[in-house]
Image (cartoon, coloured by chain):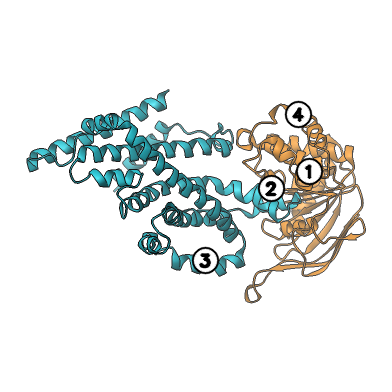
Chain colours: A orange, B cyan
Amino acid sequence: MIEVKGLKISYGSADQRVVAVDGVEFSVDQGASLGLLGPSGCGKTTLLFALAGLITPNEGSLSINGEKVVGIRRDVALILQNAGLLPWKTVWGNANLSLKLSGRYPAENAAAVLEELGLAEFRERFPSELSEGMKRRVGIARALAITPSVMLMDEPLASLDAITQERIQNLFLELWQERRFTMVFVTHDIEEAAFLGEEIIVLSERPARIKTIVENPQMGSLDYRGTSEFYRIVTHLRRVMEE
Amino acid sequence: MKRSLYTVLSIAGLLLAWWIFSLILEIVRGVVIIPNPWQALAEVGRNVNEISRHLYASAIRLVTSMVIAFLTAVPLGLIIGYERQFDRLVTPLIYITYPIPQVVFLPVLFIIFGLGDAVRITVISLALFFQVLISARGAAKGVTQEDLASVLSAGANRFQVYWHLILPASLPAILTSMRVSIGLGMALLFLSETAPLRTLHGLGSFIAAHLAFRRDIAFAGVVTMAFLGLMLYILLDVIERVVCRWRYVKRRDRPQWPLRLKMAKIREWISKKFSSS
């Protein structure tokens, strides 16, 4: 369970203060999925980084599973835009990074995840030798390797071609249903939000404030994209975003 | 195979240019001013035992200085580049001390500490130190927020940030600065070996000893110095290929533009530019 109350985050020096997130409140149940949908540069990444413990908020509180977020947590995985792979580490080195740095988890985890995502034969490759879609999968493998209870994702599918994007969205949906982690993802893509979010929070331009919360209870199947409910949600989200 | 052929060709070209230059000088001035390459190479062969002793002494000095510069400048440069407050404190100091030519310390240090190798190595390493320090600092500053978020979210502590992110991200620039400083290192090596002692082992003193009366032998020393430099470049290339292996793999994430296509595009752009005006 994730709880966010009265969150306010600003950065910059005193005379040039930029408010990125202003008074955001929401909660996500264990195993649920929440999409944070907003225009580019609205402060949604800042919000996600605060959840990951990378940024300390100025006001308000953040808690995960009843504990206040004060730093990086071992049960929270973060998938970054462009996968966040280190170019000098191989697929194996990248997938195993979180485990290696903490020294707490067995290395078999990363091996099993690579196997599951069909990356086992590319273990010794470097990221520059992979296609964009494969890079994203390595990023996912790194996150899954720590068997997280919360998965945070920052525009995980930005700048992918449409087919690869859909494939990886499907992969996310399947992994989420299989492993029952809590999923919070940030996106500017309306259809992605409608496909992956059980609940979708629409954020305003900077500073990010909550415009509306849209329930999306019928999501959860791979053919949801073809249904009229999906179109209804997408149309509704688009209207709210344009307001 | 192809690469080594090009190396041979370029060395042959250099020798040819040297030969022509020495011929022109001889014709214009009527006396031999610099020996031609074949004379110099012959002297290398004739004095091979003596020269290799001098080469060994010089190589040890230069390599030791490079290793000392690397081991001191890299950690400091990376820390200055990454820790902002430390940067503000130390960088003004670097900018004040860096422009001082380190070679001015040579006579002073010789007077204080005697004519030993410690002084030579100190002065050479000091000069190289600044070159490497400044590039390491710049490279560490260039580390992106995305990469930082990536290792921090993986749970990295401060040491791990340096080891897994800042050092590997900066290594290519550091190795380039090491290559650039070979030239400077050579110049200081020469100066430090020539100035006070003629009986010293080292290519500098060997060259200086023969420069007045046997320029062909002196140039044999120059050739040997060039050889030492080439070996160091090759060594650094090999090191880079090992420690930065990721930079030498075949990229798949960007379109590969054939060079000829690029040139055709540039030509097209130029012709358009001129035809329109």
Query: For the point 51% across and 51% down, which residue is it?
Result: B68
Amino acid beneath label 4: Gly
Q: Amino acid at mark 1?
A: Leu
Farthest-out residue, top: B1
Distance Cα–Cα, label 3 vs label 1: 36 Å
Answer above or below: position of B247 versus A26. above
| Relative vertical location of residue B224 with respect to residue A234 in this rendering, above or below | above
Label pair 3/4, CB-CB below 8 angstroms: no
According to the picture, the residue beneath numbered tag 4 turns out to be A118
Same chain check for tags 2 and 1: yes
Question: Residue A63, image x and y in percent?
Answer: 87, 60
* Disc 2/disc 1 C-alpha distance (Å): 20 Å
Secondary structure of the residue carrying tag 1 is helix
- Residue corresponding to mark 1: A99
Q: What type is the residue that disc 3 sits on? A: Thr
For marks 1 and 4, the one nearer the N-term is 1
Distance between the alpha carbons at the discs numbered 3 and 4 = 48 Å
Report helix, strand or loop for mark 2: helix
Both marks 3 and 1 on one chain: no
Quarter of the N terminus of chain B within the rendering? top left
Query: Chain ID for label 3?
Result: B
Q: Position of residue B34 (x, y in %)?
A: 18, 40
